[in-house]
Amino acid sequence: FLEAIDGDSLWVSKDGKRIRVQLAGIDAPELKQDSEQNTDCTIDLEKAQQARDLLTDLLSSAKKVGLVTKEEDPGGDILAEVYADGLSVGQELLYKYLAVEGQGDWCD
């Protein structure tokens, strides 16, 4: 684990290369949002920050981070289930209401 990009994507190192991993099956709000902000977008931005922080905390404190790759695109990006010490990171984000299954209806 190198760095959380946002609540549902992160950078990892694989064979000396920096690879982007998208969490499979969930969607969290994006940190970058349109300039037109309303109350819903402010709430989404707060959730995006909380999701990124939780992802960072779970993965940086884990003794073992595991990936179960679902897809890999030609550019090398990976869609995967991610585990921190055997705990599903995606499920933790869902339990804390910081992500939804499938595609969310966020302001991004």
Image: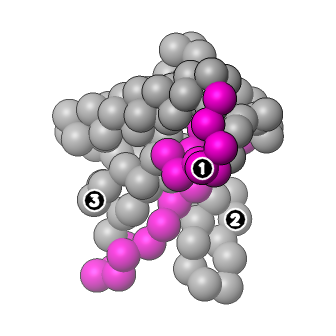
What coloring was used for the rendering? Answer: one colour
Amino acid residing under circle 1: Ser
Whether pointer 2 and pointer 3 mark residues with C-beta atoms closer than 8 Å, the reply is: no
Q: Residue at x 36, y 75 (%)?
A: 18
Q: Earlier in the sequence, mark 3 or mark 1?
A: 3
Q: Residue at x 23, y 41 (%)?
A: 60
Q: Nearer the viewer, residue 59 or 28?
A: 28
Q: Which mark is residue 16?
A: none
Point out the stretch of residues depicted in magenta. Answer: 14-38
Amino acid residing under circle 2: Glu
Q: Is residue 80 visible?
A: no
Q: Nearer the viewer, residue 64 or 5?
A: 5
Specify the quadrant that holds the N terminus.
bottom left
2 or 1: mark nearer the eye: 1
Q: Earlier in the sequence, mark 2 or mark 1?
A: 1
Q: Which mark is residue 2?
A: 3
Marks 3 and 1, how far apart in space?
Answer: 29 Å
Return the x and y of residue 14 as percentages of the image width and height: 37, 73
Return the x and y of residue 89 as percentages of the image width and height: 48, 33
